[in-house]
Image (cartoon, rainbow, N blue to C red):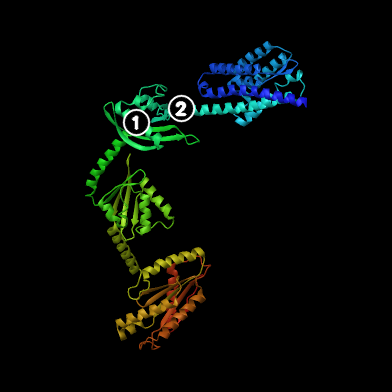
């Protein structure tokens, strides 16, 4: 029980020693932002001196353990000097602390001095080994090393037990807290240096002020304006910097911001500097701490004089353009670099009546296109979503792509886009409705003429010219695919007598009726029925063999008989036809349209010679 009381007393005394050490660590952390500005040697000397004083204070309040051995936390500050400020600071702290321990003397002087030397080595080793490691890893590695390595000499004079364990525990936690506090202080110091460096190189008037409107930090632009060095304006207010009433007004405005807790956004004001009128835009934002207490403000003031001059020039030019463009026949629209409307002449508005009300200055092109889609004035490309189409049109302006627009009212508008350097874009719209309507009329007329050129005007079926064009294609295909192809030549029997008996008008009607019958029998899309000349017709049957051709010929002959067209000059008393069939089989290598038609014509002659009103198949080619 007495041993535990002794350990409790040691703990209470070491707690006081712990607080002394932590006080010096707190001083170091407070001075970190100022100390880091010094060069290495003075910074190391200051850190080594401060930590050696902390070690001496700890040694002064050491706890007697008996046998000349004293317990304290002197090793912690000695080691911290080397850990955070390098070998020079570590050696300074070790030299002073070790000398003091030897001067005190006692049985534990040598082991204590050796422990100080080992603590310094632990700190210096950690300075190199712990670089780049996280603060947590650095604290744990350093603290563990500080507890284990310097404790080895203590084992020479005191056994492992409660006192030694308590001392080691205080050392460990003291080292962990110290590393955490100093790491945090150094991080804050680095962040402050980065912030000051960023502010210092900013071209605009960038500044930080405390709640009394005094400058805390400022950019190079502020320093150059007031012809000051980087620190010469710290602590000054607008009353000190701006002349007369302007300084008082600016100061009062900032104090009102603090009292009303209201930030300032984009305030533009004219200022006369050295007899020259300048324009400035200012924004100031209040900064609060976690408890929502105002700790200062961050402000930025930009010289927008050049922007203002350009804006006024654009406005003047726009007025002139408005006068000139109002007299043009084309529609003209001006856009800024973000594709917002700047100007539209009356002709442009007239071309887009459905969205005239939204094609106004300040309105984005995207919004206009969305409205045009909603109102049906324009339709998006079906291959895209509406949003993709809108973005494509907007990119077209920026990339100077021309386009043609078909409006919902049937009008056509041609749009040419061009860039205006340093200003934006211009779109010139031309109403080409009359041109497109004329082109459409011409296209329809051309199609009709093409049809007429390929059609027999009497019967309405293909004429000989169209037959030859299609026949050439089908013959080439059958040769390429090695397939069947058939041709049938058809002649109206005793047709000259028919015209003599009934007249040419009835003859024409007869030919029309026969053409309709032939077209109804040869109903496949690939079959071609054509008037070959006079009372002769021709039928081309792709992919049709001899039997198929004969079947079609017989149906056609029977259909003419079924029509029972009276013909007193014919042997049968009605109109009949004779048909000659020629066929190319798949194995036929040499094929020509002329040869197949000659063979069909020869077969037709044979049908005529055999008594008419019949179909005859000609001899196949060898």
Q: Secondary structure at mark 1?
A: helix
Q: Quadrant of residue 22?
A: top right
Q: Quadrant of residue 231?
A: top left
Side (left or right) of 242 relative to 384: left
Q: Secondary structure at mark 2?
A: helix
User: Split into 4 quadrants, where in the image is the N terminus?
Assistant: top right
Real-space Cα separation, disc 1 to disc 2, in angstroms:
26 Å
The x, y position of residue 13, in whole percent, is 67, 22
Side (left or right) of 590 relative to 214: right
Residue at 34% x, 60% y is 408
Instruction: Give the numbered dot on residue 507.
Output: none
The x, y position of residue 201, in whole percent, is 42, 28
Residue at 36% x, 22% y is 227
Q: What residue sits right under mark 1 in the picture? A: 250
Q: What residue sits right under mark 2 in the picture? A: 197
Seen in the picture, residue 593 relative to 373 is either above or below; the reply is: below
Side (left or right) of 301 relative to 84: left
Seen in the picture, residue 285 relative to 556 is either above or below; the reply is: above
Disc with the residue nearer the chain's start (1 vs 2): 2
Q: In this orientation, which residue lies closer to the viewer: 577 or 397?
A: 397
Q: Nearer the viewer, mark 1 or mark 2?
A: 1
Q: How many marks?
A: 2
The x, y position of residue 483, in whole percent, is 51, 67
Q: Quadrant of residue 42?
A: top right
Residue at 29% x, 61% y is 437
């Amino acid at each position: 029980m007495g041993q535990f009381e002794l350990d409790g007393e040691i703990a209470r005394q070491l707690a006081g020693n712990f607080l002394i050490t932590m006080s010096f660590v707190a001083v170091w952390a407070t001075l970190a932002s100022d100390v880091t500005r010094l060069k290495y040697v003075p910074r190391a000397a200051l850190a080594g001196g401060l930590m050696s004083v902390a070690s001496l204070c700890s040694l002064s309040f050491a706890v007697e353990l008996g046998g000349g051995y004293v317990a304290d936390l002197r090793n912690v500050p000695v080691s911290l000097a080397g850990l955070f400020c390098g070998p020079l600071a570590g050696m300074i702290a070790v030299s002073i602390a070790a000398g003091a321990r030897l001067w005190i003397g006692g049985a534990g002087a040598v082991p204590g001095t050796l422990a100080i030397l080992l603590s310094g080595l632990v700190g210096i080793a950690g300075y190199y080994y712990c670089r780049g490691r996280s603060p947590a890893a650095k604290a744990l590695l350093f603290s563990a090393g500080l507890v284990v390595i310097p404790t080895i000499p203590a084992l020479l004079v005191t056994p492992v037990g409660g006192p030694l364990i308590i001392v080691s525990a205080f050392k460990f936690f003291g080292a962990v807290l110290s590393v955490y506090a100093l790491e945090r202080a150094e991080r804050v110091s680095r962040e402050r240096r980065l912030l000051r460096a960023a502010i210092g190189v900013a071209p605009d008037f960038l500044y930080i002020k405390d709640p009394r409107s005094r400058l805390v930090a400022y950019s190079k632009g502020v320093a150059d304006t007031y012809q000051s060095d980087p620190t010469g304006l710290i602590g000054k207010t607008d009353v000190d910097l701006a002349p007369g009433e302007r300084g008082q007004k600016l100061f009062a405005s900032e104090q009102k911001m603090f009292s009303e807790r209201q930030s300032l956004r984009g305030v533009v004001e004219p200022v006369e500097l050295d007899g020259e009128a300048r324009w400035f835009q200012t924004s100031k934002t209040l900064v609060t701490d976690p408890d929502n207490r105002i700790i200062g403000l961050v402000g930025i003031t930009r010289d927008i004089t050049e922007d203002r001059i350009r804006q006024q020039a654009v406005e003047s030019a726009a007025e002139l353009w408005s006068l000139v463009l109002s007299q043009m026949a084309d529609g003209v629209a001006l856009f800024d670099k973000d594709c917002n409307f700047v100007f539209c002449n009356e002709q442009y508005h007239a071309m887009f009546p459905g969205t005239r009300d939204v094609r106004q200055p300040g309105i984005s092109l995207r919004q206009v296109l969305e409205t045009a889609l909603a109102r049906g004035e324009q339709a998006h490309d079906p291959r895209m979503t509406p949003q993709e189409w809108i973005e494509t049109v907007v990119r077209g302006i920026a990339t100077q792509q021309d386009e043609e627009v078909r409006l919902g009212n049937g009008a056509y508008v041609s749009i040419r886009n061009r860039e205006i350097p340093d200003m934006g874009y211009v779109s010139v719209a031309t109403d080409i409705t009359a041109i497109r309507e004329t082109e459409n009329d011409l296209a329809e007329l051309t199609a009709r003429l093409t049809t007429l050129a390929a059609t027999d005007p009497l019967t309405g079926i293909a004429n000989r010219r169209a037959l030859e064009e299609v026949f050439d294609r089908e013959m080439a295909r059958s040769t390429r695919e090695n397939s069947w192809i058939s041709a049938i030549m058809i002649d109206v029997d005793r047709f000259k007598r028919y015209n003599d008996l009934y007249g040419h008008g009835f003859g024409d009607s007869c030919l029309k009726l026969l053409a309709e019958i032939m077209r109804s029998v040869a109903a496949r899309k690939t079959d071609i029925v054509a008037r070959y000349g006079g009372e002769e017709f021709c039928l081309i049957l792709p992919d049709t063999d001899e039997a198929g051709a004969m079947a079609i010929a017989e149906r056609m002959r029977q259909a003419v008989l079924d029509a029972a067209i009276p013909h007193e000059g014919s042997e049968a008393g009605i109109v009949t036809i004779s048909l000659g069939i020629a066929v190319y089989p798949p194995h036929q290598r040499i094929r020509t349209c002329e040869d197949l038609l000659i063979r069909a014509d020869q077969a037709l002659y044979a049908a005529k010679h055999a008594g008419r009103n019949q179909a005859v198949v000609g001899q196949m080619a060898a």
